[in-house]
Amino acid sequence: MGLLENIAVVGQAALDAFDQVNEAQELEKIRVEYLGAKGRLTELSRAVGSLPPAERPQAGQAANQALKAAKQAYQTAQTKLGATKTQGVALDVTLPGRRHQLGREHLISRTMTEICGIFERLGFTVVEGPEVETDYYNFEALNFPADHPSRDMQESLFVGDKLLLRTHTSPVQIRTMEKQKPPVWIVAPGKTYRRDDDITHSPMFHQVEGLVVDKGISMADLKGVLSAFATAFFSPDTAIRLRPSFFPFTEPSAEVDIACVLCGGKGCRLCKGSGWLELLGSGMVDPALYNFVGYDPREVSGFAFGLGVDRAAMLKYGLANIRHLYESDLRFLEQF
């Protein structure tokens, strides 16, 4: 039998084999037999080169056509077996459906929303500002002179010449007072940044700062507002106390403590036996700040306060490590 006749016979045998195959494993065996590196059609195609030059064109054309037809038959068989396999899969209508997981508000966002909501009910307006601030708004206009040691407490992260990631949301207070005349009743929520990282501090954290500037504002108003906030956020019987402190932009200044949320002020390991937990910083606005915004300190007075949202969440929900808030562990986050 000549090469031409051999190509025709083997080619037809390949087509018949691919057409009759019923299993994927058997299909692979047929492919190797005819189209593999040492397959029958492959070997016949190589044999064309051994023919006399005059016979090669006709034999080569026949070999190419046989290979092409066999490959097409192989692909058709693949498609047929795949469709058959899919059609053979039974649908069990008694299986439960796949439940779509719904997102939920993160504990930080939830706490910030609750805090702002309480102050809105007390007559405050929520305002926001940029997270990348100038030295002027973050320090100078808040009574932090360039050579004052209080700047060291801020653990600042600079991103350029006189530009930094804001260390508090207090710059929003200056920006607001520049734009409007008294009365001013605002809270400024948002992210803040400092070079601090341990189980109770994070390099990125959240604050809600408040500012009131109006006629006849006193320390009694400050304590009344913060007491109303504490009872609304924690529980109706939450007591607060003010301790003398220092902040460059308030005078006098006070740290605000709340009665321990665990022992109710009796003393425990959480409050180190004191019965109190530090919550926020506050004070009466230093009249020097009014010079930066064009207010007359003889006409108005005010108070300011700053609350760490992360710390407030830890106290309210009994968290021991601030890192739980940022590790994206669904086992933790789904509890709230």
Image (cartoon, rainbow, N blue to C red):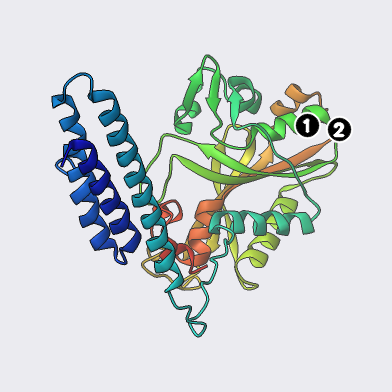
Q: Residue 90 or 127: which is nearer the viewer?
A: 90
Up the image or down, 94 lies above or below 19; here it is below
Quadrant including the N terminus:
top left
Q: Residue at x 75, y 41 (%)?
A: 302
Q: Residue 97 or 267: which is nearer the viewer?
A: 97
Horizontal relation, residue 153 to residue 287: left or right? left
Up the image or down, 50 lies above or below 196; here it is above
Up the image or down, 36 lies above or below 259; here it is above
Q: Quadrant of residue 152?
A: top left
Residue 203, position in %: x, y?
A: 44, 39
Q: Residue at x 37, y 62 (%)?
A: 81
Amino acid marked by disc 2: Lys
Amino acid marked by disc 1: Met
Q: Residue at x 55, y 20 (%)?
A: 163
Q: Residue 275 or 30: which is nearer the viewer?
A: 30
Residue 41, position in %: x, y?
A: 22, 42
- In this view, the residue farthest toward the top is 161
Residue 253, position in %: x, y?
A: 60, 42
Please name the residue that numbered disc 1 is placed on. Answer: 177
Q: Residue at x 26, y 53 (%)?
A: 13
Q: Quadrant of residue 240?
A: bottom right
Horizontal relation, residue 56 to residue 123: left or right? left
Q: Callout 2: few (<14), some (14-19), or many (20+) C-alpha neighbours within 10 Å?
A: few
Q: Which mark is residue 181?
A: 2
Q: Which mark is residue 75?
A: none
Secondary element at tag 2:
loop
Q: Quadrant of residue 225?
A: bottom right
Q: CA distance from mark 1 to mark 2?
A: 7 Å
